[in-house]
Amino acid sequence: MRLLSSKVVGQRHALEFIVPSIQLHQSGLAPEGRPVGIFLLLGPTGTGKTKTVEALAEVLHGDSKRIVKVDCGEFQSEHEVSKLIGAPPGYVGHTETEPVITQKILDEARSEDCELALVLFDEIEKAATSLTQLLLGVLDKGTLRLGDGSTVNFDQSIIFLTSNLGAREMMKEIHPTLGFDTQPRRAGVDLAEHLERVGIRAVQKHFSPEFVNRIDGVITYRPLDAVSLVAILDHHVAELQRHVHNRLGHRSFEIEIEPAARYFMLDKGTSVEYGARELKRTIHRHLTQPLAAMVANGEIDPGAKVTVNLGEEGEDLTLVAEGGSPLPVEHCCSVLAVDDNNTLLVWMDRVLTEEGFEVATAASIDEAMKKVSEAAPNTVILDYLLPDGDGVSLAVDLLKQNPAMRAVVMSGAELEQEDILLCQRYDIPVLIKPFVAAELLAALEASSLKGEQRKSASS
C-alpha cells in the first residue's frame, strides 16, 4: 500500500478499495468463474484514474505498460464493436480482422512475478451500447466469446473501467461558479461523500442496472489539493533525476529547483479543470528539453549542479550549470563502429575523433572482422541488425576471443529476449537509436567500466 501511495498521490481511498482484491487473489481465495475484481473509476480528468492502473502494473509486473488497454473512444459506433472480438467466419474481412482482446494478449499481460492480468476499458461512457452489453458476460462469468467461436478467460484478471461521468457536476460542487458564494460548499469527509453520490447518480443514469450491479466498486477520485500537486511535481522531478543518472552514468549531474521555478511549473501545469494532466508536458517543455540541449552542447560538466530558477520576465525558466569537471579522455583508445548506415558512421567518426578516439568504420560483419584482425580495436560499437548477421552475436564472439575488449550494441528496434539476456550476461550496454553525442560517449564509458569489471573478475 505504501509503495502504491507514493505512485498514486492523493487517492489513498481508491487504493484501499483495490488492494484487498489483489490480496484475495494472492491468498488463493478469490472466487472462481469471474474476474478477481471489477472497478469503475470516476472523477475529473487528471486526478490519477489511469495512473492507478499503470502503478499497479509497475508494482505487480515491473512494467507500467503491461496492461491490456481498450480505448472505448474507438468503439462509439455499433459497427465498430466487431473490432473488439473480430468478425465471425463468413463475413468479409474475417481473416484480416484481429480481435483487440485474445487469450494470447491477456496471457502476455501477466508476468513471472504475478499471474494477475490488468484490463483497462478507458472512458467507458463513450462506448456504444452494444459494447457494454457485450461486457455483461465478461463482468458476470469472466468469459468473452470471439467472432471465431473461441473464448477469452478473465478468471485471473482485474477489470478497470474509467469514466468522466459526473465530473462536471463534481467540479461545480467544489468550485461553484454562479451566485455570490464562490467558496466550496462542503469540506472534508462531507464533501467526499457528496461527490461519491454525484458520481453514482451519473453512473446509474447512464448505464443499465444489470451493468452497474456487476461492478464490485465505484470509486470516485477527488480533485487534487495543493499538497498532492506538490508531491506529484516532486515525483516527476525525482524521475527526471533518476533518468539523468541512469542514462549518463558518470557524466550525470544534479538538478536543484528553486521555489520560484517550482511555483512556475505548478502554475503552468496544473488547474482545477485538468488536474495534473499538463504537469508532465510542462516539465518536458520548460526543463527536460533545455537540459537535453545543454547536455548535447557540452555545457554541463559531469558532477555539476544545475540550478533551475524563474527567468527575469517570469515567462520561462533559467538553467545555470556550476561546478563539476570534464572527464579525462582515454587518448589512443581505438573504436570500431559497424553499421550499414554510412551517414551515421560519418557522424560517429567525427564525434569520436573530436573526443580523442582513433576511429575505424565498417559496414558489415565480414568487413568488421578484417578491421579487428588488422587493428585490434579496444572497443567495438555494433549495429544490432547488420546485412550479414546480428551485432549481439558478433559482440559475444569478440568478447570470448578477447575478454579485455569492450563492446556496445546500438539498435533502433527492440532486442529479442535471448539477445537481451546475452547483453546482460556479457555486460554489453545497449544504445537506443536515435541518440545524441552525450549518449554515445556515456555508452562508451559504461562499456569501459564493465570491461574493467570483467578484467578484475577474471584476474
Image (spheres, helix red, strand yellow):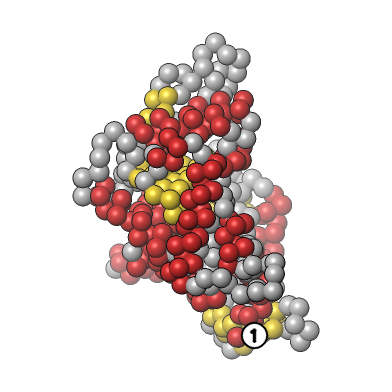
Q: Which residue is at the front of the view, 184 or 316? A: 184
Q: Quadrant of residue 1?
A: bottom left
State the residue at coordinates (54%, 10%).
90
Q: Which residue is at the front of the view, 62 or 455? A: 62
State the residue at coordinates (51%, 13%).
89
Name the spot of residue 266 as percent of width and height, x first. 62, 74
Name the spot of residue 269 as percent of width and height, x first. 64, 69
Classed neighbour count for the residue bearing mark 1: other residues with Cα under 10 Å, few (<14), some (14–19), many (≥20): some
Q: Residue furthest front?
A: 180
Name the spot of residue 327 as percent of width and height, x first. 55, 79
Q: Residue furthest bottom?
A: 323
Residue type, numbered disc 1: Ala
Q: Quadrant of residue 331?
A: bottom right
Q: Residue furthest top?
A: 90
Q: Quadrant of residue 319?
A: bottom right
Count how many numbered circles sit on residues in the image: 1
State the residue at coordinates (41%, 48%).
39
**At numbered mark 1, what does the secondary structure look like: helix, strand or loop?**
helix
Looking at the image, is 87 positioned above or below residue 160?
A: above
Q: Which residue is at the front of the view, 431 or 382? A: 431
Find disc 1 in the rendering and name its residue.
260
Q: Which residue is at the front of the view, 224 or 318? A: 224
Q: Quadrant of the C terminus?
A: bottom left
Residue 267 visible:
yes
State the residue at coordinates (55%, 41%).
206
4 horizontally vs 275: left or right:
left
Looking at the image, is 190 positioned above or below residue 25?
A: below
Residue 64 visible:
no
